[in-house]
């Protein structure tokens, strides 16, 4: 019996775990399956050809919001040309009430809800027996609890060199956020630490670039967390980063201490804020001390050793534009390396979707079921926030304008006003939502900032510093140096003006010019809680790269 499992990931670099959990579970029960891995960026013809070439007796599909429509279409096509193929579908998009009827209308024969490690091998064994004996499979049957199943089989490990990999040390979530699918399930299961350590070792040995723990709230169990965080310290010399999702207000003193001691660049954390409005947080059952959460994130940022990702959700109950502006400015104020502005998705099976009429939600009827408007925000306001999201992602999250943004923000009443103005400026010039090069990003922000009243000499200096630090180059485009046909704020120095001869000779003159650049212009100088811009010299070493920010080292003075 030829069985295939079709996994269609959101991106190529994101190698999902579900298919490999299922294959490992099947192998443990003497059932072999072939995993076909694709991404949503692959053409449907490529995926379709791969399926048909296998001539499957059983075709299994893992279904998520990013691939649901594609999966349904593939199932329908498959049943037209190979009606004898048994189609099995599982994943988060089949967990809601009525999913069986939805997917069977496209041709699915079996819908597996919940964890598939126990259910899929049982179903495949029954189908194999059915070939020989004609017995009928009952979907409620499975193989019982077989304990932890490691997805890190050789076939998976061979695929993740230089890519993002995933691991989970627990399954479930103790919280009940109304917009999250995790709120549907109950209970929180922790996997054996020796299994997790073995998985970490295997992923590091396989050359994974990033190892992301997909536990929903990693810092709930203090002992479990500390054991894992202590363990990963041994990999500080490896070219790998570990990613964790944490609740920032639940970080204990012990957890904060070990975070402060982490080697630079070894860890990333994702600290969800979502909103700072107490009424909003209460409505979605998200219990959080906002002030403590923001204070803890600021402390972590001040250490400089951990990459910090924060996020907000637009479109939550009771959050109108004024409230969201406050949430945005509060989240932005911690100066995390990445601030994700996301939009509420009313996922099937979640409580917030059941309460849609209460808040007058209008949302897309197809995946990802994103909010269009509600009682508190008009469609036009949601679209406005989409523009702000685009500007934020391009100009802030890219990490290419850190110094310049700090200066230009002082020209606006708030961070929100800065990105709102920037999004409108880009929209007027047809650049919003359009692709553009790195140098174009700097040119656009220069023109925007000058119109906003920026000092040309300070602006040019900061743009040049940001350019060489973020792109790790000693070649500054002339257009960036000379926007109006004359030199303004920044002067490029000769090597002998900022370095002694012994250093230049030890590196080699040509190599020195490729590695170091000396600049004279208006540089940021910290004075207490304020930043002043004084004319001074700065040296950038393009080989001295910060493992947290990815920017080249900058010395001012």
Image: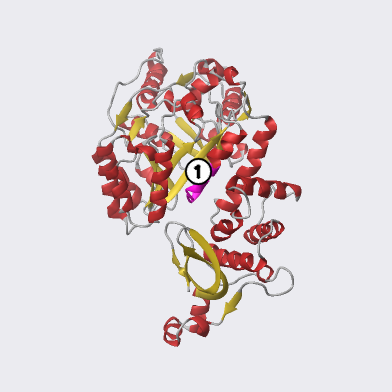
SS at mark 1 in the image = helix
x, y (%) of residue 230?
26, 48
x, y (%) of residue 111?
47, 20
Residue at 39% over, 21% down: 123
Q: Identify whether 322 is placed above or below 233.
A: above
Magenta stretch: give its range.
329-340
**Quadrant into which the N terminus falls:** top left
Query: Residue 407 or 30: which is nearer the viewer?
Result: 407
Q: Identify whether 279 is placed above or below 226.
A: above
Q: Identify whether 34 is placed above or below 135.
A: below
Task: Give left or right: position of 25 versus 68.
Answer: left
Task: Give left or right: position of 51 versus 418.
Answer: left
Q: Is residue 60 visible?
A: no
Q: Identify whether 349 is placed above or below 288.
A: above
What residue is disc 1 on? 331
x, y (%) of residue 297?
41, 46
Q: Is residue 321 visible?
A: yes
């Amino acid at each position: 019996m030829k069985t295939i499992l079709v996994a269609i990931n959101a991106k190529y670099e994101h190698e999902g775990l579900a298919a490999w959990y299922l294959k490992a579970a099947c192998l443990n029960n003497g059932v072999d399956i072939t995993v076909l891995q694709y991404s949503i960026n692959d053409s449907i013809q490529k995926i379709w050809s791969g399926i048909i070439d296998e001539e499957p007796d059983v075709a299994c599909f893992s279904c998520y919001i990013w691939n649901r429509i594609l999966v349904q279409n593939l199932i329908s096509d498959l049943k037209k040309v190979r009606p004898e193929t048994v189609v099995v579908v599982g994943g988060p998009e089949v967990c809601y009430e009525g999913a069986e009827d939805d997917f069977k209308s496209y041709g699915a024969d079996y819908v597996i809800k919940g964890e598939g490690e126990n259910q899929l091998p049982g179903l495949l064994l029954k189908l194999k027996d059915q070939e020989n004996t004609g017995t009928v499979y009952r979907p409620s049957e499975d193989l019982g609890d077989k304990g932890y199943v490691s997805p890190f089989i050789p076939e998976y490990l061979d695929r993740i060199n230089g890519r993002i990999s995933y691991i989970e040390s627990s399954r479930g979530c103790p919280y009940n956020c109304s917009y999250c699918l995790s709120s549907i399930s109950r209970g929180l299961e922790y996997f054996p630490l020796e299994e997790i350590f073995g998985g970490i070792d295997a992923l590091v040995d396989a050359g994974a670039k990033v190892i992301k723990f997909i536990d929903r709230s990693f810092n709930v169990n203090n002992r479990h967390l500390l054991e894992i965080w202590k363990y990963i310290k041994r990999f500080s010399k490896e070219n790998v980063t570990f990613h964790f999702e944490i609740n920032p207000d639940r970080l204990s003193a012990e957890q904060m201490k070990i975070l402060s001691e982490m080697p630079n660049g070894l860890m990333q954390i994702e600290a969800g804020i979502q909103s700072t409005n107490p009424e909003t947080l209460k409505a979605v059952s998200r219990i959080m001390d906002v002030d403590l959460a923001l204070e803890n994130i600021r402390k972590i940022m001040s250490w400089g050793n951990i990459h910090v990702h924060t996020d907000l959700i637009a479109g939550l109950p009771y959050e109108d534009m004024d409230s969201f502006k406050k949430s945005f400015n509060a989240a932005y104020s911690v100066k995390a390396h990445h601030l994700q502005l996301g939009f509420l998705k009313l996922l099937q099976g979640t409580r917030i979707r059941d309460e849609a009429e209460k808040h007058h939600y209008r949302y897309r009827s197809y995946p990802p079921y994103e909010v269009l408007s509600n009682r508190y925000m008009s469609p036009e306001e949601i679209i406005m926030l989409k523009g702000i999201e685009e500007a934020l992602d391009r100009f802030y999250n890219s990490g290419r304008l850190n110094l310049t943004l700090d200066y230009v923000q002082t020209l606006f009443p708030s961070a929100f006003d800065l990105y709102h103005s920037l999004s409108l400026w880009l929209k007027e010039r047809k650049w919003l939502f359009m692709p553009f090069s790195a140098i174009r990003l700097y040119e656009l922000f220069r023109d925007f900032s000058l119109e906003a009243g920026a000092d040309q000499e300070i602006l040019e200096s900061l743009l040049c510093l940001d350019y060489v630090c973020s792109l790790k180059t000693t070649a500054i485009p002339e257009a960036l140096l000379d926007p109006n046909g004359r030199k303004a704020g920044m002067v490029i120095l000769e090597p002998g003006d900022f370095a002694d001869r012994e250093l230049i000779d030890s590196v080699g003159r040509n190599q020195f010019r490729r590695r170091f650049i000396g600049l004279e212009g208006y540089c940021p100088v910290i004075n207490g809680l304020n930043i002043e811009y004084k004319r001074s010299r700065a040296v950038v070493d393009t080989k001295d790269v910060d493992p947290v920010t990815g920017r080249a080292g900058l010395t001012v003075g």
